[in-house]
């Protein structure tokens, strides 16, 4: 087994718990309970004493549908990287909720939006960037759980830690994208 750092992103959104804005405004108590339940579930998954049970649950055909051994290995940070069984270990390869990773982060939203623009799936606009950032509502998370302070000691300074490209500034997506060749143009709207 070799020890290597995460190779694509040092900090990446794995999954997002999302609700409609109107529903959140109309159901603040229910939303807070949902966020707390999600936090407890993430903590359960992150607790390595529960890996066997979590792997069995996720192995079901109506869930992930792979063998419990594969799921357990992945949750533990051991990624098989070659047909001969060679694995790499990194405790950051799958972050479910530890070290504040389940807390919504507008930098992550901006980075995801930048990738959508980069690959020609949306136009670049300040309005769309603001809309993307507004989806990741740390205020709702904090209201339900309180601010989460624990972070990795080697947290990427730009909040992303991408393997290639310039450092990411969530307030200057245009400059970030200027370093990349855009693969496909977004069609101009007919107005």
Image (cartoon, rainbow, N blue to C red):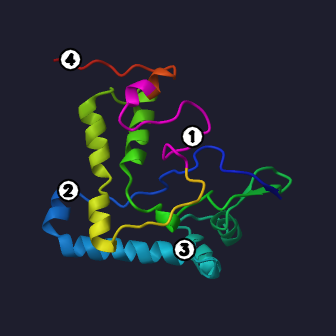
The stretch of residues the image draws in magenta is 156-175
Few, some or many residues within 10 Å of mark 3 (<14, 14–19, 20+): many
Q: Distance between the residues labelled 2 and 1?
A: 30 Å
In the rendering, at what x and y percent does residue 54 appear? Answer: 58, 76
In this rendering, position of residue 145 left or right of residue 159: left
Task: Give the mark toward the camera: 2 or 1.
Answer: 1
Among the two numbered marks 2 and 1 on one chain, the one whose residue lies closer to the N terminus: 2
Magenta segment main secondary structure: loop
Give the residue at the far right of this rendering: 84
Label 1 SS: loop
Among the two numbered marks 4 and 3 on one chain, the one whose residue lies closer to the N terminus: 3
In contact (CB < 8 Å): disc 4 and disc 2: no
In the rendering, at what x and y percent does residue 119 appear? Answer: 46, 28
In the rendering, at what x and y percent does residue 107 appear? Answer: 40, 45
Among the two numbered marks 4 and 2 on one chain, the one whose residue lies closer to the N terminus: 2
Label 2 SS: helix
Label 3 SS: helix
Q: Name the residue under label 4.
A: 190
Q: Name the residue under label 1.
A: 162
Task: Give the mark toward the camera: 1 or 3.
Answer: 1
User: Residue at the location (56% across, 72% down)?
Assistant: 46
Task: Give the mark toward the camera: 4 or 1.
Answer: 1
In this rendering, position of residue 9 left or right of residue 18: right
Q: Which mark is residue 21?
A: 2
Q: How far apart are marks 2 and 3 (CA)?
A: 28 Å
In this rendering, position of residue 188 left or right of residue 14: left
Task: Give the mark toward the camera: 4 or 2.
Answer: 2
Q: Which mark is residue 45?
A: 3
Among the two numbered marks 1 and 3 on one chain, the one whose residue lies closer to the N terminus: 3
């Amino acid at each position: 087994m070799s020890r290597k750092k995460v190779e694509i992103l040092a900090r990446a959104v794995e999954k997002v718990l999302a609700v409609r804005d109107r529903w959140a405004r109309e159901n603040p108590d229910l939303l807070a309970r949902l966020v707390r339940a999600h936090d407890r579930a993430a903590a359960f998954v992150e607790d390595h004493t529960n890996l066997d049970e979590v792997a069995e649950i996720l192995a079901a055909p109506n869930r992930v549908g792979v063998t419990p051994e594969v799921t357990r290995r992945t949750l533990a940070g051991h990624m098989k990287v070659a047909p001969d069984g060679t694995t790499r270990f990194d405790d950051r390869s799958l972050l479910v909720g530890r070290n504040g990773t389940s807390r919504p982060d507008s930098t992550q939203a901006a980075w995801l939006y930048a990738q959508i623009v980069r690959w020609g799936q949306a136009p670049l606009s300040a309005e769309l960037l603001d809309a993307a950032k507004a989806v990741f509502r740390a205020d709702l998370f904090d209201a339900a759980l309180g601010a989460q302070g624990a972070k990795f000691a080697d947290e990427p300074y730009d909040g992303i830690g991408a393997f290639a490209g310039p450092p990411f500034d969530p307030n200057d997506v245009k400059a970030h994208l200027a370093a990349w060749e855009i693969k496909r143009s977004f069609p101009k709207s007919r107005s």
